[in-house]
């Protein structure tokens, strides 16, 4: 765990224990910090049923809105694969190379638009930024449905990536302000169910809207973009009024005492006794995130996720089509793998939070994805093995969706301090999108249906980045934590002041990295 045994709230999340001895020790240490003493007092009030009631209240007020807007956002950006099947390439007179270039342009702006959006999120708040992101994405989608040439399509893909960039890291950061380390992975996976459901709904919506193909002389892809874009625009306007702010700014359904407890809990959740750092974003936080070995190791794993996951998700409808199904039926058949993936991602988050085994919660889904891809490689060219190929697609999809929240949460847990954490998540998201830049160009049309390059590169990145890297990182964290264990608390407080420990964040000898 990233908090050590002396932390009063982490164990209180699930178990009702007598905290009096712990509090007496903490109060002695925290005599110079009135906020920490206040936090300990509030922690006594919010235990057991009181804490469960507050957590349920947060779940109902925070999660549904984030799930829904991320679902729409993911549908809006992911329907390019559906558009391909309903004539977008032909209408704009593109070959497969030009089409892949259009896919790649999205990831260029998506990759580097995340950090600026995170800064805006800290300054303006979730209501303005997240609803504004969804509105901008929706308008670009409508314009895409009206475009008719490469000259307009490519700039719109760049704009879509730029506006989409703030959605995922923004939602992920908001969750870290509401939940503790012991709760964050399970809640993050519930939020990420929006992506899984989007994959299912996108296929079903495309199946339904695709029935309008050639209506009024227009191909189905235009109706997909315009109808989905108009609906998302309406939702974006309403989202401003229902999205929640961070605990410090949230009113209405939180009483003052609850708000104060959540603010202090978030402040002291990562730094053990005096907090990670102030709830601000400054140059020091940015530098700390950019020089953290943990951020870069996990970013590499996240990059590998993007390399194989995005390529697969873009290609699933085409794989279905190559198996002999019509374009419309291919859309419908692309939905069940995402439904299966929804159950996988929820189970993964529950396992990770319950047993605190972050590496295993990453490696197991990766192994399932690896097996799924192998099945596809061996069966995709054999028409009589359609059912087996479909099983492989389901396993690959089920494993893939678990990895994004796993790496994102692991990154946030091993970066102490609100500012550093926000930057760390953004950096990781930059790399997963750069991976998407690779993934969108490895499934080559002239290799269909075998896709030797696509499946081969995917298996390589999956094995190296999502199986081998987490295992090696697990050993590294164990080594780092064991070195910190060599110093007793008495030695630590003799060597460092409370302020120094606070400024050190996760580098503090009191901090333990999650593994």
Image (spheres, grey):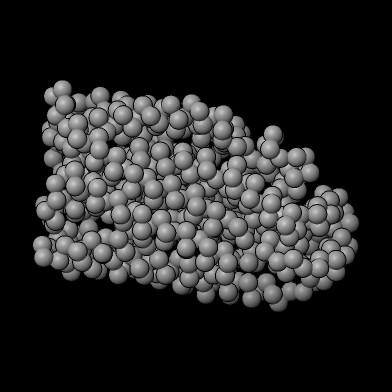
Q: Quadrant of the C terminus?
A: bottom right
Q: Is residue 376 above or below residue 238?
A: below
| Location of residue 12 by image quarter | bottom right
Q: Is residue 330 above or below residue 472?
A: above
Residue 400: percent from left, percent from top = 37, 59
| Location of residue 395 by image quarter | bottom left
- Residue at 30 percent of width and 61 percent of height: 394
- Residue at 60 percent of width and 34 percent of height: 125
- Residue at 39 percent of width and 51 percent of height: 196
Q: Work out whether residue 155 can be spotted.
A: no
Residue 204 relative to residue 39: left or right? left
Q: Is residue 401 above or below residue 94?
A: below
- Residue at 81 percent of width and 66 percent of height: 19
Residue 469 relative to residue 179: left or right? left
Q: Work out whether residue 149 can be spotted.
A: yes
Residue sitting nearer the eye, 465 or 43: 43
Q: Quadrant of the N terminus?
A: bottom right
- In this rendering, the count of numbered labels is 0
Residue 324: percent from left, percent from top = 11, 53
Residue 125 relative to residue 427: left or right? right
Residue 429: percent from left, percent from top = 45, 49
């Amino acid at each position: 765990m990233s908090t050590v045994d002396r932390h009063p709230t982490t164990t209180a999340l699930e178990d009702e224990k007598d905290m009096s001895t712990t509090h007496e020790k903490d109060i002695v240490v925290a005599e110079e910090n009135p906020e920490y003493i206040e936090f300990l007092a509030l922690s006594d009030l919010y235990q057991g049923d009181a804490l469960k009631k507050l957590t349920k209240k947060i779940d109902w007020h925070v999660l549904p809105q984030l799930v829904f807007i991320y679902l729409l956002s993911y549908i809006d950006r992911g329907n390019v694969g559906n558009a391909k099947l309903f004539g977008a390439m032909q209408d704009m007179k593109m070959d497969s190379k030009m089409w892949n270039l259009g896919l790649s342009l999205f990831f260029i702006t998506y990759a580097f638009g995340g950090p600026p959006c995170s800064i805006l999120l800290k300054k303006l708040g979730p209501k303005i930024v997240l609803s504004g992101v969804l509105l901008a994405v929706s308008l670009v989608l409508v314009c895409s449905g009206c475009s008719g040439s490469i000259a307009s399509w490519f700039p719109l893909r760049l704009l879509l990536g730029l506006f989409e960039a703030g959605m995922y890291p923004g939602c992920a950061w908001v969750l870290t302000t509401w939940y503790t380390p012991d709760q964050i992975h399970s809640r993050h996976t519930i939020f990420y169910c929006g992506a899984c459901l989007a994959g299912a709904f996108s296929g079903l919506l495309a199946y339904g809207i695709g029935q309008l193909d050639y209506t009024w002389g227009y191909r189905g892809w235009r109706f997909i973009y315009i109808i989905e874009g108009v609906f998302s625009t309406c939702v974006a306007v309403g989202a401003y009024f229902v999205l929640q702010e961070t605990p410090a700014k949230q009113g209405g359904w939180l009483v003052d005492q609850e708000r104060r407890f959540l603010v202090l809990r978030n402040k002291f959740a990562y730094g053990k006794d005096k907090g990670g750092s102030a709830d601000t974003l400054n140059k020091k936080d940015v530098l700390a995130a950019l020089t953290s070995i943990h951020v870069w190791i996990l970013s590499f794993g996240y990059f590998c996720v993007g390399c194989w996951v995005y390529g697969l998700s873009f290609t699933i409808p085409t794989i279905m089509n190559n198996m002999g199904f019509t374009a419309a039926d291919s859309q419908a058949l692309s939905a069940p793998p995402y439904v299966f993936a929804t159950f996988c991602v929820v189970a993964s988050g529950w396992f990770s939070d319950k047993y605190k085994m972050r590496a295993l919660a990453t490696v197991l889904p990766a192994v399932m994805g690896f097996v799924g891809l192998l099945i596809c490689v061996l069966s995709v060219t054999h028409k009589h093995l359609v059912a087996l190929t479909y099983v492989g697609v389901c396993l690959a999809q089920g494993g893939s969706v678990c990895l994004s929240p796993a790496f994102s949460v692991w990154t946030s847990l091993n970066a102490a301090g609100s500012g550093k954490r926000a930057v760390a998540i953004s950096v990781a998201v930059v790399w997963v999108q750069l991976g998407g830049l690779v993934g969108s160009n490895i499934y080559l049309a002239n290799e269909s249906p075998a896709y030797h390059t696509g499946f081969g590169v995917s298996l390589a990145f999956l094995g190296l980045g999502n199986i081998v890297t987490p295992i090696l990182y697990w050993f590294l964290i164990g080594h780092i934590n064991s070195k910190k264990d060599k110093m007793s608390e008495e030695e630590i407080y003799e060597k460092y002041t409370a302020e120094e420990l606070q400024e050190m964040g996760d580098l503090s000898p009191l901090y333990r990295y999650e593994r």
